Image (tube, rainbow, N blue to C red):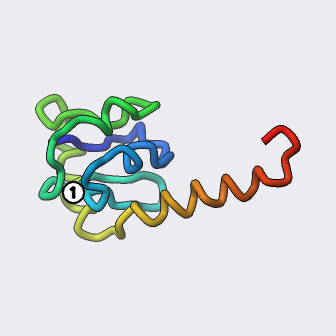
Amino acid sequence: MHIVNQNCLRCGDCVQVCPVRECFKIGEKMVVIDPNLCIDCGLCAQICPNNAIVHDSVANLHWITYNARFSKEWDSADSFVFEQKSDQKNSNKGDKNG
């Protein structure tokens, strides 16, 4: 399984590529991965621009515990990411270069 660490920027790229999007939960400053839903495909780790997603075999125990705990408390990141991308698209409508 993969976990998210302190390097997360909450950009949403990981959620976009994940075949099990509901495994991502969103907090105020970062996302976490629900260890019970992650299928360990690694797509999220490959696309993460800040190397914030790592396999649990090389992760700090603190972040493994953090992901497990907050994945039960936080809401799904799936809808947030789509709203965020949609807002960015709408803000570019008035841009002559966009």
- The residue lying at 41 percent from left, 61 percent from top is 27
Residue to which mark 1 is pinned:
34
Which residue is the extreme one toward the right?
Answer: 96
Disc tally is 1
26 left or right of 41 in image: right
Q: Residue at x 31, y 47 (%)?
A: 18
Q: Is residue 48 above or below residue 31?
A: above
Residue 76 in picture, x, y percent from top left: 35, 66
- Quadrant of the rendering where the C terminus is positioned: top right
Residue 36's x, y, as percent?
Answer: 12, 58
Q: Quadrant of the N terminus?
A: top left
Task: Identify the element where label 1 is drawn.
Answer: loop
Which of these two is toward me, 70 or 78?
78
- Frontmost residue, 26 versus 60: 26
Q: Is residue 35 left or right of residue 87?
A: left
Residue 5 in percent (x, y) is at 32, 41
Q: Quadrant of residue 45?
A: top left
Q: Amino acid at mark 1?
A: Asp
> Looking at the picture, does residue 79 appear above or below residue 92?
below
Q: Is residue 73 above or below residue 10?
A: below
Residue 30: % across, % down: 43, 52
Q: Nearer the viewer, residue 11 or 5?
A: 11
Q: Residues within 10 Å of mark 1 (few under 14, many from 20)?
A: many
Relative placement, left or right, of 32 versus 97 is: left
Q: Which residue is painted at 67% across and 53% down in the image?
A: 89
